[in-house]
Image (spheres, rainbow, N blue to C red):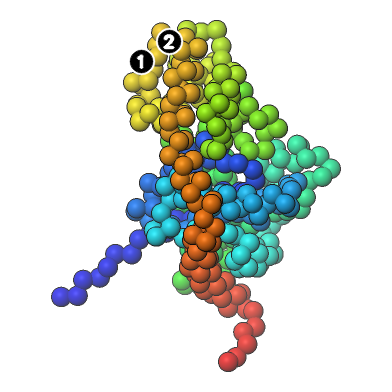
Amino acid sequence: MKVEMQTKKRILSGVQPTGDLHIGNWLGAINNWVTLQEQYETFLCVVDLHAITTAYDPKELSKNTLSTAALYVACGIDPKECSIFVQSQISAHSELCWILNCMTPINWMERMIQFKEKSIQQGNNVSIGLFDYPILMAADILLYDADFVPVGEDQKQHLELARDIAQQRINAKFSKNKNILKIPQPIIMKNGSKIMSLIDGSKKMSKSDPNEGSSINLLDTPEIITKKIKRAKSDSYIGIEFNNPERAESRNLLMIYSILSGKEISQCENEFSETGWGTFKKLITEQVIESLSPIQEKYKVLINDPHQLNNILIEGKERADDLAKKTLKRVKSKLGFFEMGK
């Protein structure tokens, strides 16, 4: 009797190569991918096209792209299980983005929350690329027929847009039977999906924050980590709590400690119910340094072996490019683009 092999469901995600990755990127995204890679066919992109939607240093872009890919692997992503590739090296991303641009009503874009927030920060320098960011993200996702997309709460609106474009503007208009584009579902982590700033627990930890003390980067030295946590915002309460709405910084640091130590939040709350900030900061500092040490060691090996890293990206690109071209060809065929005969 013939036994059919069960094919894995597919996921796609990525991080911008804008500066050093921080523990928010790790605990909120990459750590999640490490778990998911065993269950899903995984495509992980270094989204460098997204990185140029705001001001950037051309000299740093290539360097940061390579560094981000190396950190993926150093954090536990297995290149044998996952396809790691650079977004700009797959031309189908830009081509599908243009097609989706022409299918998407502008009023859908005008309601995107992240554009409103970031455009306020940039003022008159805001680019069309930043406005169009969600369409490129939709192209990223839809190109690979992703079944699921791991996203944080702040990216959920972008995934909803990708789903609406695929279903309402492509599938419903250009295909009566079989879907042209697969409709992806979100995977949202409960804990760790949104790590907050060390200096303001109401704001997400961000690589674009001008205050370097707001985040702990994955490549920070023990001395820098110690200094940042020591200066992290605290309050006058005794004990470290998680559910007190008036103590955002306490909640954030306790969640970080819980994830890194492997202990439940409730266990941590009981353990630190009468602990002062000084003592707790020393304990979380030790935990962060200990947790980042193996990542930093593996990163140093990879970044000093460009041949190995280059091979990982070449292999990832080949797998990604093959899949992306098939999807793009299917879309163009259904939308009426002329196809050259052989």
Q: CA distance from mark 1 to mark 2?
A: 8 Å
Q: Position of residue 243 (x, y in %)?
A: 45, 19
Residue 156 or residue 253, whichever sits in front: 253
Q: Position of residue 196 (x, y in %)?
A: 56, 29
In the current view of this chain or complex, which residue is farthest to the right? Answer: 124
Secondary structure under badge 1? Answer: helix
Q: Residue at x 50, y 64 (%)?
A: 311
Q: Residues within 10 Å of mark 2 (few under 14, many from 20)?
A: some
Q: What label does residue 21 carry, if any? A: none
Q: Residue at x 68, y 29 (%)?
A: 211
Say whether residue 115 is left or right of residue 222.
right
Does 251 appear above or below 5? above
Q: Is residue 108 visible?
A: no
Amino acid carrying mark 2 in the image: Thr
In the current view of this chain or complex, which residue is farthest to the bottom? Answer: 342
Q: Position of residue 137 (x, y in %)?
A: 60, 54
Residue 200 or residue 175, whichever sits in front: 200
Count of numbered marks: 2
Q: Residues within 10 Å of mark 1 (few under 14, many from 20)?
A: few
**Residue under pointer 2:** 275
Residue 258 or residue 251, whichever sits in front: 258
Say whether residue 336 is left or right of residue 78.
right
Q: Residue at x 56, y 75 (%)?
A: 329
**Residue under pointer 1:** 271
Amino acid carrying mark 1 in the image: Glu
Q: Position of residue 193 (x, y in %)?
A: 48, 37
Q: Are marks 1 and 2 in contact (CB under 8 Å)?
A: yes
